[in-house]
Amino acid sequence: MSWWALLVLAAAAYGLKALGLVVLGPRAVEGPALRLAALLPAALLPALVVVNTFAGDRRLVLDARAVGLAVAILATWRRGPFLVVVGLAAASTALVRAVG
Amino acid sequence: MVAAHARGALEAAGNPVGGAPGAWQSRPMDDGDAPCPVGTPLPDDRPGVAAGPRADDDAPLPAPVRKDIWVVGAAVGVFGVSFGVLGTTAGLSVAQACVMSILVFTGASQFAVIGVLGSGGSLGSALGSALLLAARNAAYGVAMAPTLARRSLGRRLLAAQLVIDESTAMATAQPGRRAREEAFWTTGLAVFVCWNVGTVVGAVAGDAVGDPEALGLDAAFPAGFVALAVPHLRTRRGRVAAACGAAIALALIPLAPAGVPIVAAALGVVPAVLFGGEPPAAESGR
């Protein structure tokens, strides 16, 4: 990857971050739009979970990551602390891969 | 609001009676009051409106939450190590991996770039999927704008670099404005430091770290997001948004290029606002 491409990526990534925060910042978001914005993490975090677990190359896949996700959901439901949730998910996925 | 604040403090202290899974999971940003019709102003940034500022708007970020933010940072540091290893394996130089973590600083996009490049994809498709993934940060910027609106332009330009999943998730999970802003900065800086230290370690140590996939580190990434999502599922609106977001992403994985499923999942907030209103009885039990 060229440095040129890397800097283009960096500039674009920063521009996207700044768009909502700096361009809209002073006026803030009003009324219904604010309620929508407040819910964005609720919609996007599960989407990231789903994509990082079940996405293959343009297809759905079921592999060792799904075991890690199931363990993570169980650990979260049992109110495990953050590091326990993350650690158990990694360990169970690694275990399934080692066995499989 | 005082009662709600006290409950929030109890939860933040890890009181099991409060039902909080962990100190880092505080109350969600809104919907803490009786059901509001769409368009009702949030308490955020409305000093002096109607009932006056909320009591918990001035409450600082509780110390246990602050501590747990660094736990999140430590976990992100491990992802950083895995990015450093995989990035150099995919053909980045050590310097490129480190500069990317400083300047691009949005993990999913960085993993997308090295994933596409490592599997022999074109530079165009690598940048395309990275930017589609980065587009969600624009949405996070919108979510954080009210909290940071009073800060100077320079401060907001600095804050913009820290607008990522973790900082937005931690911030919007806090009940009051001051705690939200403190959670944003603390999480953003903790993740920035840990992600970059991790990248350097992974890029330099390389093979000595081992294969990140054999260690299950790719599964640790979504697991962290599961934990971060929990505070956002306490309201019915949050649960509807989460279910719709996950369903949209799942449906689009086979149909659309990488990145699109996640950006499209932002539309999950629309049914949440339209149909996810709290039934009057549901609030009292929380």
Image: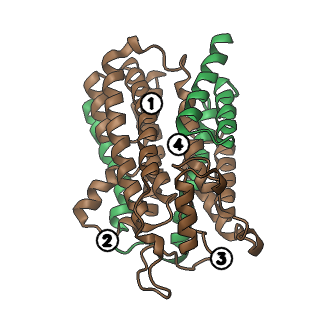
Q: Name which residue lies at 77% across and 72% down.
A: B281
CA gap, disc 2 and disc 4:
32 Å
Whether marks 3 and 1 lie on the same chain: yes
Label drawn at residue B249: none
Q: Mark 1 against mark 4, which lies toward the viewer?
A: 1
- Other residues around mark 1 within 10 Å, as few (<14) / some (14–19) / many (≥20): many
Q: Which chain is brown?
A: B
Identify the secondary structure beneath mark 2. Answer: loop
The hue of chain A in the figure is green
Q: Mark 3 against mark 4, which lies toward the viewer?
A: 3
CA gap, disc 1 and disc 2:
33 Å
Q: Which residue is mark 4?
A: B259
Q: Which residue is mark 3?
A: B34
Chain of the residue that carries numbered disc 1 in the rendered image? B
Whether marks 1 and 2 lie on the same chain: yes
Identify the secondary structure beneath mark 1. Answer: helix
CA gap, disc 3 and disc 2:
28 Å
